[in-house]
Image (cartoon, grey):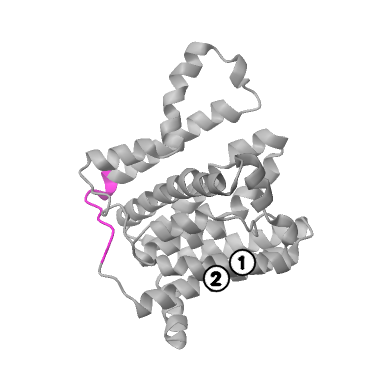
Amino acid sequence: MIKATFLFQIAKIKENLLTFLLILTTAMVTIYIGLLHETLKESLTYLFLMWFFSFIIDLYALLRPTKDTFIVRQPKRESFYFLACFTLGLVFLFFRFSPSIDWQQLNKVVRLALMPLILFVFPIGLAIIMLLLKYKLRDLGFRLNGLILIIPIILISALVNRIVSPQSLTYDVLVAETGGILETLLTGIIVAGLSEEFFKAIGQTRLGAYLKNFGLGWFLTVFIWAFMHAPKWYSEDLNMTEAVLGSIRIIPIGLMWSYLTHRTKSILPSVIVHGTNFWGLQNF
């Protein structure tokens, strides 16, 4: 099966060279970031680990194929809804984190008018739209498939991070910020994992169906997700270059999480893996 998995991945590259070139370009920029920050070892290890996890995911999917799929009834209309929700969320992030706008001094009426847009930062608005379109939770990826994959991904990530980049471990910081282990897990899984992986699952399935190219829809969705982090990062140190590079740097791990969703046809494994992302290997 190992040989079959390699052949499967090679075949997929040949089927979609555009997506492969986009991933390759992202990898090259990630290596450049490692050189820029004098963390080449960490960047190379990070990229290798993301590929290795994709290999494990493909191996599992070939051994345990599922008949489940993501239903997309109206690709064009639902892609529009996804992009509209992303845009509204971005508007809120701009006003909330733009250095040129003092959120606390903003007119109270304006702030009140902007607050509902937070529903599109955390994809509550997107979820409501999908439910109004008569999608069931199972249709949206809430299935128990592939949960076994979270074990090797979490364990290998933690071990490699401890060996290669122990200084980037974020566990202690997160526990200190949230107040305890349970609070850290709940915050990670619900606020980060569930909201972001649901957003990406809807995006990659709708854009992939609309473009008739899953690989391109997958990459574009992760690209959008990654750059939604840029306004906050820019507001923290007013360094646009680092905000952009930081967004590109998290694309590989975002691709891995979203690929896990695609191959298992469930968002739950990626929600848990994302929500327990304490190793911080992407932070170099």
Compared to residue 66, the image places residue 238 above or below, namely above
Query: Is disc 1 in contact with disc 2, using a CB cutoff of under 8 Å?
Result: yes
Q: Which quadrant is home to the N terminus?
A: bottom left
Q: Residues in magenta?
A: 68-77
Q: Residue tagged by mark 1?
A: 47
Image position of 150 with respect to 73: above or below: below
**Position of residue 104 measured from the top left corner of the image (x, y, whole percent):** 61, 18
Quadrant in which residue 122 is drawn: top left
Residue linked to disc 2? 51
Q: For the view shown, which residue lies furthest in the right direction?
A: 38
Camera-side residue: 57 or 142? 142
* Residue 240 position in % (x across, y down): 68, 40
Residue closest to the eye, 66 or 169? 169
Category of crowding for the residue at label 2, using alpha-carbon neighbours closer than 10 angstroms: few (below 14), some (14–19), many (at least 20): some
- The spot of residue 81 in percent (x, y) is 33, 39
- Give how far across and how far down residue 110 sits, in percent: 49, 15
Is the C terminus in the top left, top right, bottom left or bottom right quadrant? bottom right
Q: Residue at x 49, y 34 (%)?
A: 90
The disc labelled 2 sits on which kind of residue? Trp
> Which element carries disc 2, helix, strand or loop?
helix
Q: Where 48 sits versus 144, above or below?
A: below
The stretch drawn in magenta includes residue 260: no
- The answer to whether residue 17 is seen in the rendering is no
Question: Disc 1 to disc 2, how far (Cα)?
Answer: 6 Å
**How would you classify the magenta stretch by its main secondary structure?**
loop
| Residue 76 is a magenta residue | yes
The residue depicted at 25 percent of the width and 56 percent of the height is 71
Q: Secondary structure at mark 1?
A: helix
Seen at 26% across and 65% down, the residue is 68
